[in-house]
Every structure is written in C-alpha cells, then in structure tokens.
Image: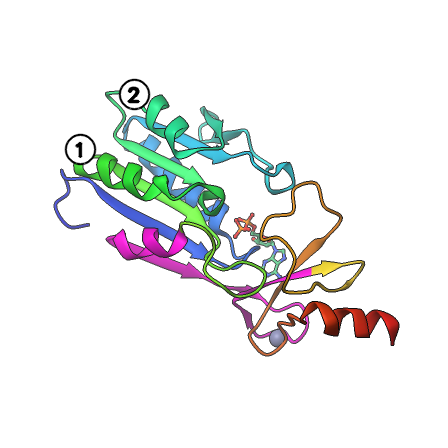
C-alpha cells in the first residue's frame, strides 16, 4: 500500500455471500500475525447478519468484535494505540462513518471496511458510495447467482419466496424476508403494484 507508515482506507464490497466477512477476517488475522494492534467492530443492527462475535487467528488467539450501531460508537471506542480498525457490515452505519474513517486514516490507522454496496433494489446502500469514493483500495467480490450460476452482483430480497417490491424499507429489522445472490439478469425488483399483481395472479 502507498506510504506503509501512513493510514489509508480499504473497502471490501460486493453482494451478500461474496465472502466479504471471510476476507475481512483474513486481513485481520494477518494484521495480528504482523503484531499490529487491531480493533474489530461489527454493526449489530440486524442480528440475522451476525455470526461472529470473535475473530480467531490461526494460532487460536481470539479478538473481540465490538458490536456497534453508530459511527460515533466506533470513534469513541478506538483506543489511542490501535493501528488497524476493521468494521464489518459497514453498510448499516450512518453517514458519519465516512468522516470517522477519514479521521482514523489521517491519524495513521489502516481502516478496513466490509459492506454490501447495493440494497435489494440495486441502489447504493447507505454510506457505501461516499466510503468507496474515499478508499485508497477497493475489492469488489462476487458470489454465484443461485438462479443461473453466473457471477452474482445483486442482493435479491424474497418475501415468502417471491421477489420483494421496490417500495419496501431498505432495512427490514426482524422481517420474514430472505436474501439470495443473483446476477443483473436474474435480479427482480417488481413495483408494489406488480408484486400485488403477481400475488393476485
Ligand atoms: P459476505 O460477508 O459477503 O456476506 P461471507 O464471508 O459471510 O459473505 O460468506 C461467504 C461464503 O458464503 C462463501 O465462502 C460460501 O461458502 C457461502 N455461500 C453461500 N451462498 C453462496 C453463493 N450464492 N455464492 C457464493 N458463496 C456462497
Ligand atoms: Zn443469474
């Protein structure tokens, strides 16, 4: 990376199931091997997206993932001697996370962010656009489209197994919907009237 001693922002992005969390953890484990001081944060806005409370390094060392819901909570909990700050599920953060990431990078931190770049409609998700614009490095990962087997770039929201209408909320906490990774061709976002027509038809 440019200027090894300086800070920077790197974003791991892409559709759900593309391996963003795996890649974030891989980078965190390697930073621990390099004896860097690391803090990991994870948005706990929606527990269905969780799965890890700890990051384990290869030698069994565990690192705690701080549950956070706001960018202020990240800023407040970063310790003075932390060299690497990682945030998973960063798409759920408020817009202030862009400023927090900039301040941390300016102060010499390596900032690793992982989050899905698009909502279920295919629109930019929350703070992801500004974060991607600020990042020194971006890796966009792909999953496999569960319909056709091509590379998936889109988050398909399903309600009762059917494509969900565009008018639904971006984040449905505690909802009964599910998600699939799909390619652009197989991704379906009906309008509410279309979705109703499908139900009636
Ligand atoms: P993300 O953080 O991007 O949601 P994870 O790191 O949690 O992704 O999970 C990635 C893993 O999900 C893959 O290694 C694979 O085992 C699994 N997986 C499930 N569905 C798919 C899919 N449609 N395409 C690719 N991987 C998938
Ligand atoms: Zn497809």
Task: Out of 134 and 28, give the one closest to the viewer.
Answer: 134
Classify mark 1: residues with Cα within 10 Å, few (<14), some (14-19) or many (20+).
some
Question: Does dot 2 land on a helix, a strand or a loop?
Answer: loop
Q: Quadrant of residue 112?
A: top left
Task: Name the colour scheme.
Answer: rainbow
Residue found 42% across the figure and 44% down from its top:
24
The stretch drawn in magenta includes residue 197: no
Q: Which quadrant contains ligand 1?
A: bottom right
Q: CA distance from mark 2 to mark 1?
A: 12 Å
Residue receiving disc 2: 79
Is residue 179 shown above or below 84?
A: below
Q: Residue furthest bottom?
A: 185
User: Which quadrant is the C terminus positioned in?
Assistant: bottom right
Task: Out of 187 and 35, give the one closest to the viewer.
Answer: 187
Residue 27 position, x and y percent, is: 37, 42
Q: Is residue 27 left or right of residue 20?
A: left
Of the residues under marks 2 and 1, which one precedes in the sequence?
2
Q: Which residues are magenta?
A: 128-157
Is residue 168 shown above or below 98?
A: below
Residue 127 position, x and y percent, is: 40, 49
The stretch drawn in magenta includes residue 129: yes
Residue 83 got which mark?
Answer: none
Q: Residue furthest right?
A: 200
């Amino acid at each position: 990376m440019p200027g090894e001693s300086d800070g920077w922002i790197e974003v791991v992005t892409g559709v759900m199931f593309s391996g963003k969390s795996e890649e974030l953890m891989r980078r965190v484990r390697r930073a621990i091997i390099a004896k860097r001081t690391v803090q990991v944060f994870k948005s706990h806005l929606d527990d269905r997206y969780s799965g890890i409370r700890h990051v384990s390094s290869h030698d069994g060392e565990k690192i705690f993932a701080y549950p956070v819901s706001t960018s202020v909570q990240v800023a407040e909990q970063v310790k003075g001697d932390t060299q690497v700050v990682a945030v998973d599920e960063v798409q759920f953060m408020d817009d202030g996370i862009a400023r927090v990431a900039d301040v941390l990078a300016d102060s010499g931190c390596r900032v690793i962010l992982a989050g899905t770049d698009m909502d279920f409609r295919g629109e930019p998700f929350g703070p992801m656009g500004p974060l991607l614009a600020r990042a020194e490095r971006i890796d966009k990962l792909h999953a496999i489209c569960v319909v056709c087997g091509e590379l998936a770039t889109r988050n398909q929201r399903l309600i009762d197994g059917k494509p969900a209408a565009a008018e639904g909320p971006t984040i449905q906490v505690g909802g009964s919907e599910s998600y699939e990774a799909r390619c652009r061709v197989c991704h379906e976002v009906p309008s509410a009237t279309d979705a109703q027509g499908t139900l009636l038809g």
